[in-house]
Amino acid sequence: MSLSVFDIFKVGIGPSSSHTMGPMRAAREFVAGLKRDGLLAATSQIAVRLYGSLALTGIGHGTDRAVLAGLEGAVPETVDPDSIEPLIRRVRSEGRIKLLGEHEIPFDEPMQLLFMRHETLPRHSNGMRFTALGANSSVLREDDYYSIGGGFIVHGDETEASGVRAAHVEPPYPFTSGAELLAKCRENGLELYELMLANERTWRSEEEVRAGLLNIWKVMQQCVERGFRQTGHLPGVLKVKRRAPKMYRVLTEGKGSSALEVMDWVNAFALAVNEENAAGGRVVTAPTNGAAGIVPAVMHFYARFEPGANEAGIMRFLLCAAAMGMLYKRNASISGAEMGCMGEVGVACSMAAAGLVAALNGTNEQIENAAEIGMEHNLGLTCDPVAGLVQIPCIERNAMGSVKAINAARLAMRGDGTHKVSLDQVIATMRQTGLDMQTIYKETSQGGLAVNVPEC
């Protein structure tokens, strides 16, 4: 089954693609299945159990809130972020929930939404179990779901993630490795973005692909703009103050005399996105929410500071960045609960580096080289969010990843595309490193900064 660019880049809400978007989608899919099979009206109780990383950092990531919203029918792509808080207050004050917004039943959250902090389901650290009960507490249905990163979910023992394009017609140029991708470009005389566009035309017209990509870019821009406008503290016990608005004000009021001002802008772009994400705002999953600021920051760098930047460059950027994301998802993982932060910030850095080279009309080999550099220097990066919140070190880490991506692109552009370590070798190394990494460093808040920094 082939992935689409729009599987890698998805509009959603913060603070986490794996802990917010995935659980919301799973909860809705479960109750939608009850309705489809005629079981919704007979449901008198719903029980939800969260396992592994979802249980350990779910409160800080808003997993409980996402599940409640999903049970009521919300989907990450279309839900109004401002509507979630009133929904949660109503459910908790009334002790009742409206499944799919139509079938109301009692809901005792402390007893029916449980965090199983000492248990893990077999397939993935981000496990969920939904149970629908009927009269006399008889079990109508019980299903397991797994949130595998980037908002993707798998149901039970499915081999493919829900939401991944069910391509009955395979694209003309399928690829499973970086080497194969480059080879197919050479054999067919294609630029990498041209190959990606040809594949996308399997499922959409070229006009629809263009409109979809430009909408992704529009949402990214809107997110940065909101991040520059908002002030105050982010939600949660850490009371982290937003920094992007002040940085933006200082930069726009300054005289631009510093040679490093461009870096300041890149930092501001990234912080704006991830502060919005931490506040539960609208973001583009790229490829995850925890790393959602890197691709937009580098795209804003391209649009603002590169002479000749245009919409065609934006499209090349997104198409080629998505190609790299597909390789990581297929051959390793984009889940912090599996790979640590190299599966999120590391992958986003690699994607952004490749995208920038493509936007600047680099060669296919330079694009692959940039992606390799972007990941090679993120290997071993842990995921250790303080207090389970997507704030420290996550927000600042996006700024660092954005600057690193730009440097990786510049290094690649200064060469001819030949290099000793291939992207495929780095991806294989990343996967092995993730498997070797201790669980406490994989989005559990049981190691690293999470245990060495006081929560308040």
Image (cartoon, helix red, strand yellow):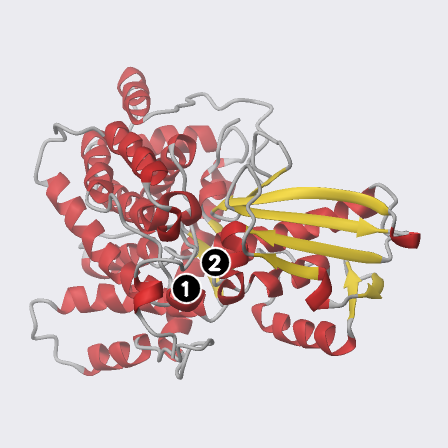
Label 2 environment density (alpha carbons within 10 Å; few <14, some 14–19, many ≥20): many
Going by the numbered disc 2, the residue's amino acid type is Ser
Residue 237 seen in the current view: yes
Assign a secondary structure to mark 2: loop
Query: Looking at the image, which is closer to me, 302 or 348?
Result: 348
The answer to whether the residues at label 2 and label 1 have Cβ atoms under 8 Å apart is yes
Q: Residue at x 86, y 53 (%)?
A: 43
**Residue on which disc 1 sits:** 390
Residue 453, placed above or below residue 93: above
Going by the numbered disc 1, the residue's amino acid type is Val
**Residue on which disc 2 sits:** 16
Residue 397 is left or right of residue 229, and the answer is left
Residue 161 is left or right of residue 278, and the answer is right
Q: Quadrant of residue 338?
A: top left
Label 1 environment density (alpha carbons within 10 Å; few <14, some 14–19, many ≥20): many
Image coords of residue 309 (percent x, y): 25, 52
Q: CA distance from mark 2 to mark 1?
A: 7 Å
Query: Looking at the image, which is closer to me, 85 or 366?
Result: 85
Residue at the far front in the pictured view: 118
Residue at the far right in the pictured view: 135
Residue 191, placed above or below residue 87: above
Query: Looking at the image, which is closer to me, 43 or 284?
Result: 43
Image coords of residue 312 (percent x, y): 32, 45
Which quadrant is the C terminus positioned in? bottom left
